[in-house]
Amino acid sequence: MNADQRDDRRDARGRQRGAARSRGQGHRTSQAPSQRRRATDPARTAAYDVLREVDASDAYANLVLPPLLRERGITGRDAAFATELAYGTLRLQGRYDAILARCVSRPLDQLDPEVLDVLRLGAHQVLGMRVPAHAAVSETVGLCRDRVGAGPAQMVNAVLRAVGRTSLDDWLDRIRAEAPDETTALALTGSHPVWITRALREALHGSGRPTGELADLLEADNTAPRVTLVVRPGLVEPDDLTADQEPDGDVRLTPGRWAPTARVLAAGTDPAALGPVSDGRAGVQDEGSQLVTLALAATPLEGRDERWLDLCAGPGGKAALLGALAARQGARLVANEVQPHRTRLVRQGLRAVPQEAVEAVRTGDGREVGTDEPGAYDRVLVDAPCTGLGALRRRPESRWRRTPADLGTLTGLQTELLTSALEAVRPGGVVAYVTCSPHLAETRLVVEDVLRRRDDVERLDARAVVRDVLVPGAEIDLGADDGGADGLDVQLWPHVHGTDAMHLTLLRRLA
């Protein structure tokens, strides 16, 4: 081809044209590059919007996603896909960040947060879901164009293709090999911060369990929990649980593993569609949460049994179960909550409990109750504010928000609340100290710190009480007898019991 021919194939701006286009046979899209594949499906868009809300507003995914799906009319398989994509990405964020860091040319913290969330969603589809790699990449690039812009789309495409060239197992082997120590390797591959991984190892040992269970615990935290209902005694029977949207009105329920009040809901059924759930006779509640509440109500008392107190009652799940139990045992419940908006949730949760069993639902500082009402109660529940490390499978974003610095503030508050509860209970009465965290600083050490200053409190055998309230015939593994305050406290675990990691200490006030 001579120079004159080459010049004939240049356009008015001097740009070289291909041979076909120079002959007028080429096809040229009417779309600008920024407009190509500019959208994705509603399920992926919903998952992305949830991640952005979680990051930008410190929202919880389990509070953001359900109303968003209803608002956008996303149902069935699309809703299930969006749920797995959003929650799975949040749970495995640490693992995916470790992989993405090996595929991106600059540190991840230098990426725009919106782009990083797109990459995480793409990585979960490529490595953690049954989505064909080409579809995962294409749809994620479309999501990037739609929600972020055309600029980063090429980078997203290249990074996700690099992610997909290596299998998940090979990625995890590489991360383990490059980690400085075993704890860091477990933290990265198991998608938990290193400090939480270390704390969970110590908690396993402190409750009499082998530390070799740590990998199983981390994996359980990364597994979506089943939806468990509480059938509040005296308010509803399991046979009354029906769903209006089912043609025959039947709902597939299976008995809980441990608590007689627990029923496990079949996948795909919306709990809100059940009449007893909507009117408060039943509710969604983890089986471990039910067990510790049942244990407080069943602990033997000396003397009267008339007034019960839930010191930190919000959002109201345990209060509602306590109220139902109080009604059956002829007692009255006072539900106290420090935050007004959570007090409203407690009142809503108690709406089905007989009025004569609810003395008051009030807003107040639980640390002051012991001084204001000394010796006024027979049973007191301290469901203390905590790091929530026992419910990471339900609130996966919590692991990325919490820091070791939170412990100082929380353990101080926990100590004050437990001290107040022991002042509020009468001699012979019982206090249940409960946390949804296995961290030793929030459980054993708080209790020991309080008891060190008192000679009027005895520790009860919480393990024996929990065994007494189990489903008949159930045998529960609560660890070695030398774990957890000489084998008295109860520590539940996701990987062992299928519950949140609830802690229970039972204390009796002495005369």
Image (cartoon, rainbow, N blue to C red):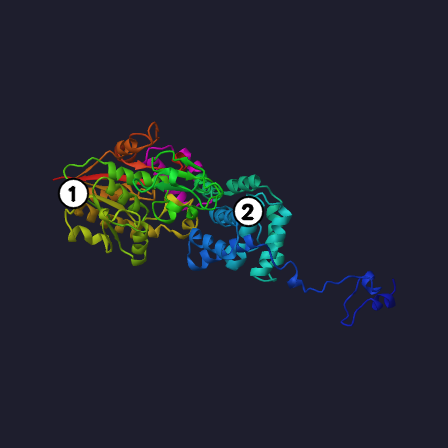
Asked whether the viewer can see residue 500, the reply is no
- Nearer the N terminus, badge 1 or badge 2? 2
**x, y percentage for residue 69?**
49, 54
**130 with respect to 346 (left or right):** right
Count all numbered tags in the image, as a single digit. Answer: 2
Q: Is residue 216 above or below residue 320?
A: above
**327 with respect to 245 (left or right):** left
Q: Which residue is drawn at 46% across and 58% down?
A: 53
Name the amino acid type tagged 2. Answer: Arg
**152 with respect to 222 (left or right):** right
Name the amino acid type tagged 1. Answer: Arg
Give the overall secondary structure of the magenta segment.
Answer: helix
Disc sitting over residue 77 in the figure: 2
Disc sitting over residue 285 in the figure: none
**144 with respect to 28 (left or right):** left
**x, y percentage for residue 496?**
39, 34
Q: Give the range drawn in magenta.
A: 191-217
Disc sitting over residue 454 in the figure: 1
Asked whether the viewer can see residue 170, the reply is yes
